[in-house]
């Protein structure tokens, strides 16, 4: 928002994070984000959340972008959203009357119906502080960016979705998003011809549902290709060829058809679980979503089965995990497949060494008994087997001969992302097992 020309203040209750950001330190790994912050200097400010009252007085639009982690029963935990909404209500109660209503935009992924809940909480906060009716409007503006390509996805989104029942909120958000929708901001990043971004306006519940349906569909698409991959192994087909042939059909599309050990991260698992929890609330069954989650869990177990097939007992075996973050170009370990796989390997008595270029240190704190290293070859040294968990460039580019010279028999590579060149690895003397690559049979 600051880069495209708006004046933005980011509030956070973590003072250390705020102080770091003021000095240009980005608290997580996200390619291009630091540069974007530098380029937005002068329009981008960071402050502690104690400045909320001031913000509520001064800003036109206030985005709520707090975490909604998975609660015990699978539903989204809205306590952070509730805290912020109440605090906003109190702040509004103490503010002088506004000429235009404050537009409160929900960016956090919240279950359908939460926008009304947020309104209620803001009003509760106003009442608690003894304030009169204050002017505010609520809108839902779901986020679709992917970690690892957040900067690109924010500046060049496939669509912007706004759900609201307020004309004022809609007008404010349309104005705010104009530089992005019209692609009128200066950029040296993307040489593509500028095409207007669809601006989708809808009601609150539909906007909230669009977010969940998008993530659930993508997760289901991956589970679908993983099920096909497992069948490919049985019948001798190659899922990469199949996905290519199927994906060329415009109605299917080629993206999110990479088979492997399944989806992870802080979004797909949580959002699929939350959608299933919403359905349960309405006593509605979701066999398709249940199956998408079950297939995903089975993919993780298949990694262990593939290891056992060639190593037999895993007791005392040295297994390298290549890549620990839930996907490349992020240091995020939330919902990372590496954690589940490491847990299973631990319980089977394997010795685990994990490589990741950015998440190794954090993983060492989360996984008991993992030896975390910053060099993939150090991880491979003396390993009986290696699992490709995250397809970092450094992993894709492994030198097969060097890997073979460092590993111990049977020199097994379980490629959980179908990211490596099977033929080159086999030629170097490694035992290669991919996912859904039928020629593995022999
Ligand atoms: C996902 C969505 O793609 C974003 O649109 C959304 O905004 C975000 O969740 C969110 O709700 O915040 P993200 O979790 O960052 O983004 O990562 P993805 O690129 O979607 O990957 C998710 C998982 O699926 C990863 O574990 C990845 O390895 C896996 N994946 C992805 C596959 O196994 N196969 C594929 O073909 C694609």
Image (cartoon, rainbow, N blue to C red):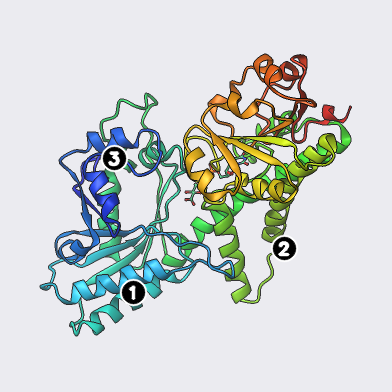
**Residue 326 screen position, x and y as percent:** 55, 43
**Residue 113 screen position, x and y as percent:** 46, 71
Tag 1, which secondary structure?
A: helix
Please tell me the numbered disc located at residue 25.
3
Q: Residues within 10 Å of mark 3 (few under 14, many from 20)?
A: few
The answer to whether the residue labelled 2 contacts the one labelled 3, judged by CB atoms less than 8 Å apart, is no
Which label lies toward us, 3 or 1?
Answer: 3
**Residue 39 screen position, x and y as percent:** 23, 34
Q: Residue 31 is drawn in which quadrant?
A: top left
Residue drawn at (51%, 48%) of the image: 365
Ligand 1 neighbours mark 2 (CB distance < 8 Å): no
Earlier sequence position, callout 3 versus callout 1: 3
* Residue under pointer 2: 287
Pick the front one: 300 or 4: 300
Q: Quadrant of ligand 1?
A: top right
Tag 3, which secondary structure?
A: loop
* Residue under pointer 1: 119
Which label lies toward us, 2 or 3?
Answer: 3
Outermost residue to the left: 96
Q: Residue 319 is drawn in which quadrant?
A: top right
- In 3D space, how far apart are the residues under numbered discs 2 and 3 (Cα atoms)? 45 Å
Image position of 241 (left or right of 338):
right
**Residue 215 screen position, x and y as percent:** 55, 52
Q: Residues within 10 Å of mark 2 (few under 14, many from 20)?
A: few
Above or below: residue 371 compared with residue 83: above
Residue drawn at (19%, 38%) of the image: 41
Image position of 311 (left or right of 66):
right
């Amino acid at each position: 928002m600051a880069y495209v020309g708006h004046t933005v203040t980011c509030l956070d209750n973590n003072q250390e994070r705020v102080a770091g950001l003021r000095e240009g330190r980005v608290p997580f790994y996200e390619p291009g984000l630091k540069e974007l912050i530098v380029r937005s200097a002068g329009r981008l400010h960071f402050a502690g959340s104690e400045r909320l009252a001031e913000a509520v007085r001064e800003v036109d639009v206030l985005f709520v972008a707090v975490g909604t982690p998975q609660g015990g029963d699978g539903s989204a935990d809205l306590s952070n959203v509730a805290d912020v909404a109440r605090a906003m209500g109190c702040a509004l109660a103490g503010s002088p009357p506004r000429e235009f209503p404050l537009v409160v935009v929900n960016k956090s992924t919240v279950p359908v119906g939460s926008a009304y809940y947020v309104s209620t909480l803001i009003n509760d906060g106003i009442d608690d502080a003894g304030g009169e009716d204050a002017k505010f409007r609520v809108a839902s503006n779901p986020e679709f960016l992917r970690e690892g390509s957040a900067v690109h996805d924010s500046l060049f989104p496939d669509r912007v979705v706004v759900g609201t029942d307020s004309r004022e909120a809609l007008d404010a958000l349309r104005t705010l998003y104009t530089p992005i929708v019209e692609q009128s901001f200066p950029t040296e990043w993307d040489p593509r011809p500028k095409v207007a971004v669809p601006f989708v306006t809808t009601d609150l519940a539909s906007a909230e549902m669009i977010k969940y349906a998008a993530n659930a569909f993508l997760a289901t698409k991956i589970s679908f290709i993983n099920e096909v991959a497992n069948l490919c192994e049985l019948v001798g087909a190659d899922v990469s060829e199949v996905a290519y042939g199927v994906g060329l059909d415009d109605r299917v599309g080629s993206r999110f058809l990479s088979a492997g050990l399944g989806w992870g991260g802080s979004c797909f698992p949580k959002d699929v679980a939350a959608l299933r929890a919403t359905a349960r609330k309405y006593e509605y069954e979701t066999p398709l979503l249940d199956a998408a989650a079950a297939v995903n869990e089975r993919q993780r177990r298949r990694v262990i089965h593939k290891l056992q097939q060639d190593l037999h007992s895993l007791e005392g075996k040295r297994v390298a995990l290549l890549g620990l973050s839930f996907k490349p170009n992020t240091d995020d370990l939330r919902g990372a497949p590496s954690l589940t796989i490491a847990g299973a390997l631990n319980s089977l008595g394997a010795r685990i060494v994990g490589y990741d270029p950015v998440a190794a240190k954090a993983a060492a704190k989360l996984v008991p008994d993992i030896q975390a290293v910053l060099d993939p070859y150090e991880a491979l040294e003396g390993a009986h087997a290696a699992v490709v968990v995250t397809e970092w460039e450094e992993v894709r580019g492994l030198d097969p001969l060097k890997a073979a010279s460092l590993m111990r028999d049977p020199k097994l590579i379980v490629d959980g992302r179908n990211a490596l060149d099977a033929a080159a690895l086999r030629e170097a003397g490694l035992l290669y097992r991919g996912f859904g690559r039928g020629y593995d049979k022999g």
